Amino acid sequence: MADPKSIEANAQRHYEVTRADLPLSCPTPAMKLWNSHPRVYLPIEKTGRAQCPYCGAVYTLVDAGGDAS
């Protein structure tokens, strides 16, 4: 039985992630894998944005500026 907290892989075209989600992979560990492409790690730390070469999903690092007070 699938984890009820899992989200559908590749169901969206844009995802917002935080530094807690790093290292970033598509699909993410929270996604169901049975119907997805192979996991690929995405470099998002420098630019704050990354696109999956398999499914085209775009990931945005929402706290890219570091500690904001």
Image (cartoon, rainbow, N blue to C red):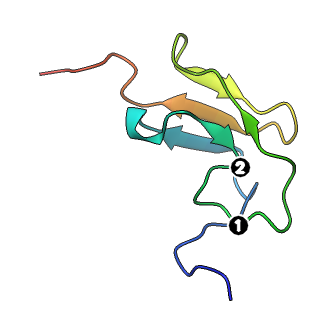
Residue at the image point whose x is 52% and y is 19% from the top: 48
Q: Is residue 24 left or right of residue 62?
A: right
Amino acid type, callout 2: Pro
- Secondary element under disc 2, as helix, strand or loop, is loop
Nearer to us in this view, 22 or 18:
22
Residue indicated by mark 1: 32
Q: Is residue 18 left or right of residue 14?
A: left
Dot 2, crowdedness within 10 Å: few (<14), some or many (≥20)? Answer: many
47 vs 51, left or right, is: left
Q: Going 71% across and 49% down the picture, which residue do you hit?
A: 27
Q: Residue at x 85, y 30 (%)?
A: 53
Q: Residues within 10 Å of mark 1 (few under 14, many from 20)?
A: some
Q: Which mark, by number, is residue 15?
A: none
Question: Please, what is the three-letter code of the amino acid marked with disc 1?
Answer: Lys
Quick check: 69 above or below 1?
above
Q: In this figure, which residue is indicated by the disc labeled 2?
A: 27
Secondary structure state at the residue bearing disc 1: loop
In the picture as drawn, the residue positioned furthest to the bottom comes out as 1
The x, y position of residue 28, in whole percent, is 63, 49
Mark 2 in CB contact with mark 1 (< 8 angstroms):
yes
Does residue 47 sit above or below 25 in this rendering?
Answer: above
The quadrant in which the C terminus is found is top left
Where does the image place residue 22, in percent across and percent down from the top left?
49, 34
Give residue 39's position: percent from left, percent from top: 78, 44
Marks 2/1: CA distance?
A: 8 Å
Query: Which residue lies most toward the top here?
Result: 46
Residue 43 sits in quarter = top right
Q: Quadrant of residue 57?
A: top right
- Tell me if 31 is positioned left or right of 65 in this view: right
Q: Where is 43 relative to 37, above or below?
A: above
- Residue 60 lies, in percent from the top left, at 54, 30
Q: Answer with mark 2 or mark 1, whichever residue precedes in sequence.
A: 2
